[in-house]
Amino acid sequence: MRALVTGGAGFLGSHLCDALLGDGYHVIAVDNLLTGRHDNIAHLASDPRFEFLEADVCASFDCGSVDYVYHFASPASPVDYMIHGVETLQVGSIGTFNALECARRHRAKFFLASTSECYGDPAVHPQKETYWGNVNPIGPRSVYDEAKRFSEAATMAYLRYHKVDTHIVRIFNTYGPRMQVNDGRVIPNFMKQALSGEDLTVFGDGKQTRSFCYVADEIDGILRLARSDEHDPTNIGNPVEFTMLECAEKVLEITGSKSKIRFEPLPQDDPKQRRPDITKARKLLGWEPKVDLLTGLRLSLDYFIPAVAKNAAVARAR
Ligand code: NAD
Ligand code: UDP
């Protein structure tokens, strides 16, 4: 069995490659390294069942016959997708069509990495899959939110019109080893700041909430969904909700840092609350997360300590 993973050199994509290789797949990772890194897949270089193709999925690419297409390519951090706004819209639209066409051509199954951002700044809490969301279609986050909503629509169209066997996961904030130290998401930011003795930058009053899922739990949920017969979107995330102030305190606790908290302006359209309703995943997949935030942060620390030191050394050398 051969699986294609677009975005395979990214944070989640690289963990997915590991898991698929562990399941006995031959894996082809396609990535243009826009926000991903060779380092994330360096440990796979000598595995004969792993291939890496440096390519943009918005251009035509050929990876031969495959049995499964996992479409994970897309900037995911708000900082990244606001810098690469047009590329984010392109990979969500043209890139998704190319990945879907690849699945259709090879009669392969298709799996879309979608997002809780489809719910926007949600008026319904917690978010169930049946909620249609509250997205600003022209705001700064729209390059990501609308690209992902479009990619869900395209995926459902290939199921309905072309009978491709498709699956859609709505991923809620996931963290862990291999996140870029500088990608701007809250956990890498707080880790970098705490480990460098800098102030932790809490945006707004810090009372906005997120629910953080450790990467191993997320990948487990994704693989269970990929093996299921479910076609409609399914939330996979941790339902335990924290304010950003609580998150900052947890990072200070596990790093033992003496850093202070500094408040900075809240970015436009920043969702005020986010927590997945995972009733569907529990019933359908028998899945629920096992790793709580403190444990997951501790597991991530072994990665962040050397990664932050390396990042500082690179910055000094510039
Ligand atoms: P990431 O930035 O680490 O990985 C994305 C990868 O896609 C990178 O390696 C990047 O180089 C690659 N890529 C981007 N555009 C490409 C293109 N045109 N062609 C080929 N490769 C391209 O981000 P991540 O956190 O690993 O996210 C992976 C996927 O999961 C994304 O689709 C994202 O929307 C989704 N997701 C992630 C989270 C999360 O919390 N991590 C939450 C919701 C959704
Ligand atoms: N955030 C913060 N400080 C930071 C980075 C982010 O307070 O240094 C906040 C951000 O405003 C948001 C939450 O943390 O409310 C999660 O942000 P992230 O970029 O990780 O992901 P999002 O869930 O917004 O996509």
Image (cartoon, rainbow, N blue to C red):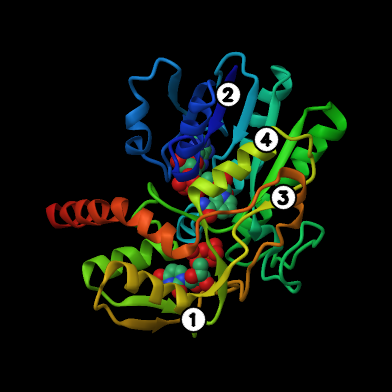
Indicate the amino acid at tag 2: Ala
Q: Amino acid at mark 1?
A: Gly
Circle 4 residues within 10 Å: few <14, some 14–19, many ≥20: many
Mark 3 C-beta to ligand 1 under 8 Å? no
- Left or right position of 239 against 215: right
Q: Position of residue 61 (x, y in %)?
A: 55, 22
Residue for point 45% across, 60% down: 79
Work out whether 235 lies above or below 68: below
Q: Nearer the viewer, mark 3 or mark 2?
A: 3
Residue to which mark 2 is pinned: 3
- Does residue 75 show up? no
As helix, strand or loop, the secondary structure at mark 1 comes to loop
- From the image, state whether disc 3 or disc 1 is nearer to you: 3
**What is the three-letter code of the residue carrying label 3?**
Ala
Q: CA distance from mark 1 to mark 2?
A: 41 Å
Q: Are marks 4 and 1 in contact (CB under 8 Å)?
A: no
Residue at 75%, 48% in the rendered image: 233
Query: Mark 4 = which residue?
Result: 226
Spatial CA distance of label 3 from label 2 is 23 Å
Please indicate whether residue 314 sits to the left or right of residue 28 in the image. Answer: left
Between discs 2 and 4, the one toward the N terminus: 2
Q: Is residue 286 left or right of residue 13?
A: right
Which of these two is toward me, 116 or 142?
116
Mark 3 sits on what residue?
281
Q: Nearer the viewer, mark 4 or mark 1?
A: 4
